Image (cartoon, rainbow, N blue to C red):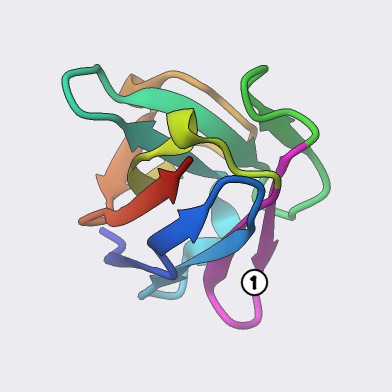
Amino acid sequence: QVQLVESGGGLVQAGGSLRLSCAASGRTFANYAMGWFRQAPGKEREFVAAITSGGTSTNHADSVKGRFFASRDNDKNTLYLQMNSLKPEDTAVYYCARARVSWTTFSQASYADWGQGTQVTVSS
């Protein structure tokens, strides 16, 4: 099992930027793909981005493509989500998760470990 702790959330104006971090415990971080998901009030949790175990390939949801960028530093056991051009509809609790596989996947059932989430609020 991998423990995940997100940080970097906060309140930002529309058009602004934030960078989320997800610190992972354990030695197996580099073996697995990682993902970012979000859940807005009254809505189901949804896929945002995923990155392969080696960090060479990413997938992003259409709603964030070109604005959000997932990356990772396996030496630091840390996952990142750079969020630019933020919109009020990006307001949500953001979660990082460890996949059971090394390739990217948007299926929540493919993720074994989840962080506690960090709140991102974008004001208009």
* Residue range of the region highlighted in magenta in the rendering: 67-84
- Residue visible at 64% across and 33% down in the picture: 103
Residue 57 highlighted magenta (yes or no): no
- On screen, 75 above or below 52? below
Residue 100 appears in the figure: no
- Residue visible at 32% across and 21% down in the picture: 109
Query: Residue 54: which quarter of the image?
Result: bottom right
- Chief SS of the magenta region: strand
Residue 78 location, x and y as percent?
54, 71
| The residue positioned farthest toward the bottom in the image shown | 76
User: How many numbered tags mark residues here?
Assistant: 1
Residue 69 highlighted magenta (yes or no): yes
Q: Could you say which is closer to the camera, residue 123 or residue 26?
A: 123
Report which residue position mark 1 lands on: 74
- On screen, 81 above or below 42? below
- Residue visible at 25% across and 17% down in the picture: 44
Residue 26 location, x and y as percent?
37, 74
Query: Residue 30: which quarter of the image?
Result: bottom right
Q: Could you say which is closer to the camera, residue 17 or residue 102?
A: 17
For disc 1, the neighbor class at 10 Å (few under 14, some 14 to 19, many from 20) is some
Residue 25 appears in the figure: yes
Q: Secondary structure at mark 1?
A: loop
Residue 80 location, x and y as percent?
59, 62
Residue 94 location, x and y as percent?
36, 46
